[in-house]
Image (tube, rainbow, N blue to C red):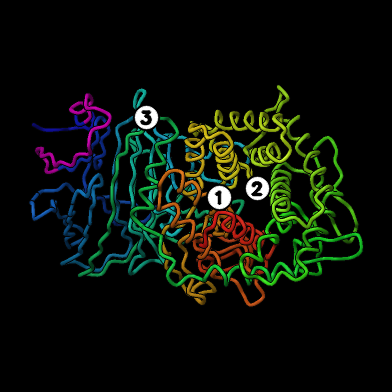
Amino acid sequence: MKISCLALFLACFSFAPLGASPRFEVVRDSAGFVPRWSCGQFVVTPPAEGLWSIATAWRDGAPAEWRHVRAVTCERTGEWTILSGELACRGGRWLLRDAYRVEDDLLHCIRRYEWTEGPALDSVTLGIRWQLPPCPVRPFLPGILYYGNPSGARNTPDNVVRYEGRAGEFALFEEHRYPMPFAAFEIECGERCAAASLFTLPSPLADPRYADHWWSLGVRQADGHPELLLLSGPIGYNGRAGACKALQKGSLQLPGQYLAVRPGTVIEKEFRLAIDPEPLRGAAFRRPVHRALELYAPFSCEGLPGFEEIVAAKCLMTRSRWIDEGPVAGFNMYPAPRRAIVMGWCGQAAAPGYFLQHLGALGVDTVGMHAMVQRSLDFLTRAPFDGEGFRVRYDVASQCWSSPDPVSMGQAMYNFALAIRSARRTGGYDTARWEAFLRRACDFAARRVADPAWHPRSTAEAFFIAPLLAAAELFGCERYAAAAARAADHYAARHLSMDEPYWGGTLDASGEDKEGAWAAFQGFLALYEHTRDAEWLRRAQHAADVCLSYTVVWDIPLPAGRLADRGLRTRGWTSVSPQNQHLDVYGVLYAPELYRLGTYTNDENLQSLARVMYRSCGQLIDPWGRQGEQIQQTNFAQRGDLSDVTQFRGGYAEGWTVFWITAHFLHAAAKFDEMGVRP
């Protein structure tokens, strides 16, 4: 029987149960052999025109003159199914081969291209394409594209990748841009959902058009069929072929991303396919995220800095930022001569009031730190309040307070609550001013959240949840706990479907970001710990898995540059957001919460990853305890010469040493200390 279209494939399995085991089969028709990977009603196949796709020209910044090849032989050898074909082209031949093996519920493939008996070719593109039935889908590219990036597309459309599933739409990026190297669609078929995912073993290519040329990975809407694809270099997004997401607010063109191929060239590409049924809309991305942890296994701390080494270096840095000038006392956000004491976000001036109380237990010399805790928090309680909350930034030169915002206020409130809790345990501190300040801040937040008209712009105000709960326990105030629960219910209703992914958790992001996901994760987990209601744990897992998707699970090979100079291992670092696609150390802050989540869910992978995240991010600390914020693992930069995109990767903007980079390490160290854990 000739199978002429994917609809017939689908019809054969439309009544299979949702929980069916994945199935691999090779179907023969009049034109050759067709591999198919299915799970119940969900099916992934190559496009109808052929299993292998090769372009031999380059026009208008994109591959051209595509040829497609069907498999003409099929054989079985051991665990492997081998499909082969060939293409006569330009006076030579392409010998093509796929080797498939089922590994539990994954389909593993090693694809081989061999150019033989012909001249050198200079404009080649190789394509690996897998199509889904023509049904509604939403894309998920870790660190890059979250269900279409609807908030970023609405607020700053030129700053992010956009994807609505229109005909011909595509989103293709260099493999080294992916913290987790997979592309996925959430498929919606009636009331059922699934994730179809393409996992890649990332690799650069020989004989490229430009140096440091890698395979690209992404999604496309092709002829009505959503498509997962790997290409030998071509990239682009938002309708622009060759566009590289190279800048915070835009793109640059990458030179022609094609190959030169000499006779005798052999190119192999390894990838895996998965189909994961998921009954809940907005949750299909979660299994692929955990598959990535299992496949790439970023759990070894071998070769990473030690916990004690990191803590000692960051304590040195903390002391260097101390300002003590009469009534003004606190920690400078910036290196001198610029001076500002800033709560939350990049300043984290309230964090030392908590973490300095724990450093003695970590073997650190704490001489003078008691006074730093008392004086810094006492000074911050002077921040004035108004209808927007309290001011979080104090400029030392002008002696002026400014800049209220929910991100910074929520983070500062949480640090005050932790400091009060620790001080009550250990004694020796006068917490009266701290407690009065925290009560006033929580009164503001509780009133705001309780207002029937409250509808926050983004996920930023989820940072109020954890401090409200902590204050409820410190002061026995049920009103604070009720406000926290109302806020958390609001954000669960907005975000669990991923119609509006978590977003806006930093002051420079107007779209989807890991900090927004962290705000919700922190709040949901705090509510679980406050109530022991399993529903809050489920919600915490959802937000945590979004945070996890920004975590690098592989050691990205780096070109010559500052990062290669230091032998950087990238596993455990976090990508910032679809807007800012460099790496940073922010994930260190929520590593303790990931560890606790692993404890609650019996997930040792999360506990191992939390250790790696903490220690890996200590690699670039200099002798003064400093680190820069922007690690350029891919073709993206925010500082320096921004004209030549091919020179970005491997760079390191080490001059932006704002205090959060230090504070988050020591905040997490104190959290681990309270848990009795050493990363």
- Frontmost residue, 642 versus 634: 634
Residue ID at (45%, 69%): 558
- Amino acid on which the number 2 mark rests in the picture: Thr
Q: Can residue 325 be seen in this view?
A: yes
In magenta, the rendered stretch is 10-33
**Is residue 237 toward the left or the right of residue 472 in the image?**
left
Q: How far apart are marks 1 and 2 (CA)?
A: 10 Å
- Amino acid on which the number 1 mark rests in the picture: Ser
- Percent across and percent down for residue 106 are 26, 47
Q: Dot 3: what SS?
A: loop
Query: Callout 1: few (<14), some (14-19), or many (20+) C-alpha neighbours within 10 Å?
Result: many
Q: Earlier in the sequence, mark 2 or mark 3?
A: 3
Quadrant the N terminus occupies = top left
Give the numbered dot on residue 506.
Answer: 2
The answer to which quarter of the image holds residue 186 is top left
**Is residue 636 toward the left or the right of residue 44 in the image?**
right
Q: Name the residue under label 3.
A: 279
In the rendered view, would you say 320 is above or below 443? below
